[in-house]
Structures are given as C-alpha cells and as structure tokens.
Image: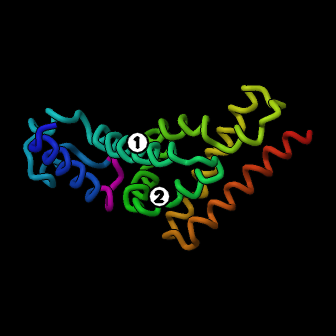
Amino acid sequence: MDARITKTKQKIKDALMALLHSKRIGEISISELCKKANINRNTFYVHYSTPESVLAEIANELSAELFDMLSKCENPAQIAVRACEHTKNNIDSYKILMQNDAEKLYLKPAIDHSKAMTLYQVYNSDGRLSQTQLDMVNEFLVSGVIAIMKNWLENDCPVPAELVDRMINLLSKSLIDGLNNQ
C-alpha cells in the first residue's frame, strides 16, 4: 500500500481512538473525526464510510494479529494465556472496543474462529456431544471468556494473565466434564 494512504488511514484511526476515550462510537460525527485527524471529509470518504467502519478495521487488524499468534499455539491449553497476553499488550484498544459493546459486533470473526481452537474441542474427544450442543457450549464459553476479559480490562488487569488463563481453562473443563458425565 502507498505510504501516504497508510499514513492517512493511521491518522484517522488514531483520531478515532482518541475520541473514543471520551465518547461512544455512535456519538462521533465524521466532521469531528476529520477535524481531529486534520483531514477533509473527501479524504475520509476515500478510505471509510463511517466512524464504525474505522473501528471495524481497527478490530479486524487486532483480530488478525491475535489469530496469527493463536495459530502458533501447539497446545490448545495455551490459547487463553496467549489471548490474555495479547489483550494486556493492547489494553487501550481492547478497553475501547469493550466500552463500545464491540465484542459481539467487531470481534465476531475472532469469536467464530475460536470454535476450532477452544477447549471444548479437546474435552469432547469422545464425541458425546452433538454439533448443536457443541455450538451452544462454545457460545456459552465464549460469552463467559468475554465477560472475564472485560472485567479484567475494566480493573486494569489486576492479576497475571496466567491466573486468568487457569480460571478460564478450569471453568471450561468443568463445564465440559459436567456435560459429559450426564
């Protein structure tokens, strides 16, 4: 990509992130965003259609980075700790996404991708749960992980990522074991 385009898009993203420290995404106008980025509206429209589309690109870039890191995990039990580390290393971005209820909308690709990587696949190795049941369990687990991560972020990551990882893995395994023992 042309360096000027990259620089302009980064200015827009940086301006949006700065505005999101004090406002929610729905409260930010294109005019306000352009003023903050020091660009004109036409330049904005060359690259994006709405402030939400800028936020979606930021989330997609964050997700792609996370996917890349998670795909290198040899052991599924490492996934949660790596996700925690990534979250902590990008705490500002994740806080803003969570504050804008973006976990379902903007992080949907990450959530969908997690189906193949989550512990429910490991703990259901005997195939006792149907695909429909697995999908429900995955949705439950992902929602729970998001809630844990959201709480962890809102409290400025008060415990180490490894402790959050152990909690997520313990809860996930307990749920699957409970279902398998029925």
**Of 99 and 107, the residue lying toward us:** 107
Horizontal relation, residue 30 to residue 86: left or right: left
In the image, what residue occupies the spot 57% across and 58% down?
81
In the image, what residue occupies the spot 9% across and 52% down?
38
Horizontal relation, residue 173 to residue 71: left or right: right
In the image, what residue occupies the spot 46% across and 43% down?
67
**Of 42 and 123, the residue lying toward us:** 123
- Magenta span contains residue 136: no
Q: Is residue 109 above or below residue 62?
A: above
Q: Which residues are magenta?
A: 20-26
Q: Is residue 73 above or below residue 112?
A: below
Q: Estimate the x, y position of residue 82 in percent, counting from the top left.
A: 53, 55
Q: What is the secondary structure assignment of the residue under circle 2?
A: helix
Kindly indicate the quadrant of the structure image that contains residue 60.
Answer: top left
Q: Which residue is mark 2?
A: 87
Give the amino acid type for the residue marked by disc 1 in the picture. Ala
Give the amino acid type for the residue marked by disc 2 in the picture. Thr
What is the spatial separation of the Cα atoms under label 1 and label 2, in whole angstroms? Answer: 13 Å
Q: Which residue is mark 1?
A: 64
Taking the view exactly as shown, the residue that stands out farthest to the right is 182
